[in-house]
Amino acid sequence: MRVALLFIIGACVAGCFSEGDCLISATNYMHIQFKKKTNTALDSAVAMTSIAVSGTDSIFVFKNDTTFHEILIPVDIHNVSTTFVFAHQSLTDTSVTAMDTLQVGYIPQSKIISKNCGAYTFYQNLKILKTSLSASQIKTFNTSLLKDPTSSGAAAYAINYQIFY
Amino acid sequence: MRLTTRYFISLFVILLCGESMLAQQKPQQKKEPAPKKDFSPAAIRFGTDLIDLGKTFGGKTFSGYEINTDVGFANYYLTADVGSWAKNLSVNNGSYSNSGTYYRLGVDVNFLGKDPDRNMFFLGFRIGHSNFNEKLTYQATSLQLFSPATITTSNPNVSGGWAEITTGLRVKIWKGLWMGYTARMKFSPSTKGNDPTMAPYDMPGYGLVQNKPWWGFNYQVFWKINWKKEPPVLIKK
């Protein structure tokens, strides 16, 4: 009987630890890193002119060809695919603007975190539908768009692709 | 949480084994052979959960009922529950609704076997199954570029299952009228058949699928129907 009483008390106490926290790992930002083709361990500084994103008339324009070794770009929350057009300085001839396109598809999964936190979309099964890059130029990492809710900056986002220039 | 679940399962098994072991350890003073326990069932108890009815008539977010039955075989009771559950909830950025039916099957072990009124303090185990549908509408936002989107998604036909460890009381009030409660620790929920665009949220009979384990409590009223006279309770002297 004493053990049974312990069981009941234990069950009640354990119930107090079931409250969920409002930590949201859902994001619609895709994380791309640029790496050197010759040594994939090294970052490649890409002088980006602009990035056009399908589903919106707005374009990310970068003054003075800002250099990046990684970018976070949003996927279209109204559609199940997004096309990105990257305009950047050619690494072989800096006077030429090179254009690369990348079309990605994904499955948006809706999930209620809790009544107080609300519902969020988790973008999963990320895959390349079309690209002007060669197969050896792009490597897939995480196929979900995820963010560490306890961190900030690009490092908080799961790496989705590495592009080698 | 998995450790907690394992702990409670072990505890339950120890309790079951412990009862029979204790019975074996008592010195056998009787010379006459003990009369055999009568395992044939003599009655069935039908009941319902008053909390579900209270929430249905007293609130706006829940509608449902639950029918509980059990049949005794000496100190062991076969139990079966069927229920219906529908919810309409507001979430921070939208709304959620579901509806479905469920059943549970299981066994209770009565630890008050010598009680002349057959009152029960029991521990038990259940397997649950649920069929339900759910719908979610909410506002999705993007920090940059895109305007907010109203997302409507649904799971038209989901099924799921879970297991429970239960404990509770059944007390005879008057003639065939019984009252009692059942506390449940529900664990190992699983679902199948959901649309890939929506993660199941609230499974009728279980609750929030993401919570493992999850807890339940029923305050029940029963009516017991006897089809034969129950054998007298055997009290060892």
Image: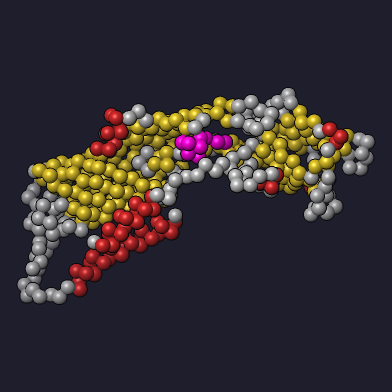
Q: How is the image coloured?
A: secondary structure
Q: Residue at x 29, y 30 (%)?
A: B58
Q: Nearer the viewer, residue B63 or A152?
A: A152
Vertical placement of B210 versus A116: above or below? below
From the viewer's perspective, tell me whether residue B193 is left or right of residue A46: left
Q: Nearer the viewer, residue A11 or B130?
A: A11
Q: Nearer the viewer, residue A160 or A14?
A: A14
Residue B47: x percent and y percent? 21, 40
Q: Nearer the viewer, residue B111 or B194?
A: B111
From the viewer's perspective, tell me whether residue A79 is left or right of residue A17: right
Whether the magenta-drawn stretch holds residue A117 is answered as yes
The quarter of the image holding the N terminus of chain B is bottom left
Residue B105: x percent and y percent? 29, 48
Residue B224: x percent and y percent? 14, 43
From the viewer's perspective, tell me whether residue A54 is left or right of residue B13: right
The quarter of the image holding the C terminus of chain B is bottom left
Q: Residue at x 38, y 60 (%)?
A: B7
Residue B197: x percent and y percent? 54, 35
The part of the chain drawn in magenta is A112-121
Snapshot quadrant of residue B231 = bottom left
Residue B28 in sight here? yes
Q: Residue at x 40, y 49 (%)?
A: A16
Q: Residue at x 91, y 35 (%)?
A: A96
Taken as a whole, is the magenta stretch helix, strand or loop?
Answer: strand
Residue farthest to the top, as pictured: A57
